[in-house]
Image (tube, helix red, strand yellow):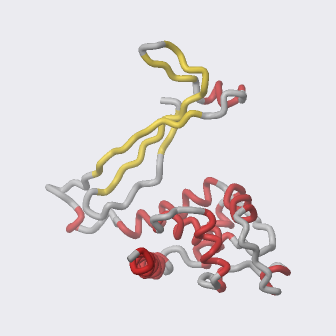
Amino acid sequence: MQAKRQAETGDKVSSLCEFFQPLVNEEFIKWAENQVAYKPRRGICSTALIVWLMIFQRLNPSHTLSRAVAELKAGKVDKLRGNGKRAREDRISGNTGGYSKARSKLPVELVRLVAERIFSSLAPPDQAELVWHGHRIFGVDGSVIDLAPESEALHHAFPPGGNQKGRCRTPVVQIVVGHDLVTGAATPPHWGPK
């Protein structure tokens, strides 16, 4: 039963990836790299590969780094691999460290450009069927994220919050995301101290 469910999930993820491929293709990734002046390192993890593995992780119910790396090892995203020596020799490790490190080095602005491209493609503002009484309707979801307490810069940029029991000692980021109620697409997140 579990094998059947995994196969069905894999099929759904594959079809969703096929849907997103024209939106977030290598040409767009190169454009985004130029927009944020990002020069990626040569190696297995090209920017396009990292972005695709992140999308795969988000669409996949297991959401794990190891699951994304397993897709890479299985050859399902070979055309997005970089052209470093290990990629050319097909020596891909199953460890998640390289992907994790490469993912953390992506500029936030590049990821924001990708998110905006996906959102604007899924929910274009000019389609009449996406409005209700002449207005687009969004559900709003917010949360807070506690940051590292050791950083003085974070304390200054994001002052610690508080509640009825007093002041917290960690800086707090407030984050909000809008969800288009017709398409379900999430807007790029916005955050700040207030």
- In the image, residue 48 lies at what x, y percent? 63, 73
In-front residue for pair 2/175: 2
- Nearer the observer, 169 or 1: 1
The furthest residue to the front: 1
Res. 110 image quadrant: bottom right
Q: Is 193 placed left or right of 119 in the picture?
A: right
Q: Is residue 182 above or below residue 56?
A: above
Between 36 and 50, which is closer to the camera in this rendering? 50
- Rendered residue at 53%/65% (across/down): 57
Q: Position of residue 129 (x, y in %)?
A: 20, 68
Question: Where residue 143 sits in the image (x, y, percent)?
Answer: 44, 38
Q: Quadrant of the N terminus?
A: bottom left
Q: Residue at x 80, y 68 (%)?
A: 41
Tell me what residue is drawn at x 29 percent, y 51 percent: 138
* Residue at position x 53%, y 16% in the image: 167
Image x and y of residue 120, in percent:
41, 65
**Is 147 situated above or below 131?**
above
Left or right: where 6 falls relative to 52:
left
